[in-house]
Amino acid sequence: MKVTDAFEPFLPLCQRLLPCRLAGLSVALLKATALEFAILAGHLLLYPSGLMQERREAAALESAEGAEDPARLPTQGPPPVVLLHGFIDNRSVFVLLRRSLVQHGRHRVESLNYSPLTCDIRTAAELLGRHIEEICDRTGSPQVDVVGHSLGGLIARYYVQCLGGDLRVRTLVTLGTPHSGTRVAPLANAHPIVRQMRPESPLIQELQAPAPGCRTRFVSFWSDLDHLMDPLESACVAHPDLRAENVRVTGVGHLALPVHPAVATGIRQALDGTGTRDTNGTTKTHRGGLTVA
């Protein structure tokens, strides 16, 4: 998936005009910015399709269409996957990721829309908990896996860490989530959700409190070009009581995390339990710019 070909003629000029160290960063930033604009344009077109809550029948049909043999869907397999979008967004952001998961054997994938008027992460986490309980009751699965983009990852983490959700969530994958809070866009503090995502907020302090015995495994994907994370490392899980792996994504912006094919591969590996390391324990570098950090 390459959308920056139109910018290639300008890249040698950038490299001649800038010092060598800055040239590589500027070229990567140019490519990532072009990709972000392309994804934003596509997402704006898809956004209306994701405004309504997902219908179970539609989810089941989509899963069946992605299976090799719809008549032989496994009755017992990996846990259902719950996708949770970010701030002022909806489930349409996961169109490509969902397709990738279904094509690689995850036949039970569901999305949750929380209201754009939501003003409290704790309330959204309670809603997520009810949604997950309903999925477990309906599917007979004792656990689910969750993939959360941006604010969605923070909501899921609060559910896991503070509301007993570690009994239900086997693996939580977060994409560009401000685990330690972010200082970006100070003028956005008028919104209570944004205030809760600040490093000094009471909610972030709650998540930094001890969490002994937490059963959920965390895998956090963070990008070195994420314009919504300040500092960038705030998207890493840094907690002594949590089983966490932080995966650095290079050359990819915030909006690209849920749609980039290399990230989708890393997500599938995380959910399958294969992780992002070789079997001998050494760090594995993925094509597309994924490294363990």
Image (cartoon, rainbow, N blue to C red):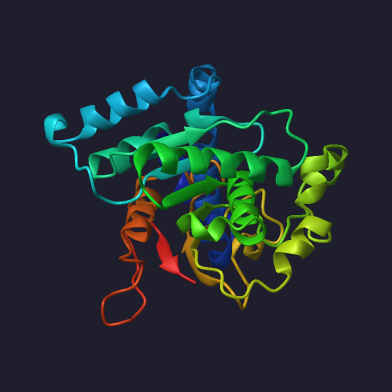
Residue 284 visible within the image: yes
Residue 223 visible within the image: no
Q: Residue at x 50, y 43 (%)?
A: 132
Question: Does residue 170 lie above or below 116 as drawn?
Answer: below
Q: Is residue 193 left or right of residue 63?
A: right
Q: Is residue 222 left or right of residue 163?
A: left
Q: Where is residue 33? Give x, y as percent.
A: 55, 42
Q: Where is residue 125? Give x, y as percent.
A: 65, 45
Q: Residue at x 31, y 58 (%)?
A: 272
Question: Between residues 42 and 165, which one lies in front from this camera angle?
Answer: 165
Q: Where is residue 192? Give x, y as percent.
A: 83, 41
Quarter assignment of residue 100:
top left
Quarter assignment of residue 87:
top right
Q: Where is residue 138? Give x, y as percent.
A: 39, 36
Q: Residue at x 42, y 53 (%)?
A: 143
Q: Quadrant of the N terminus?
A: top left
Quarter assignment of residue 199:
bottom right
Question: Does residue 77 lie above or below 138 as drawn?
Answer: below
Q: Residue at x 19, y 35 (%)?
A: 67
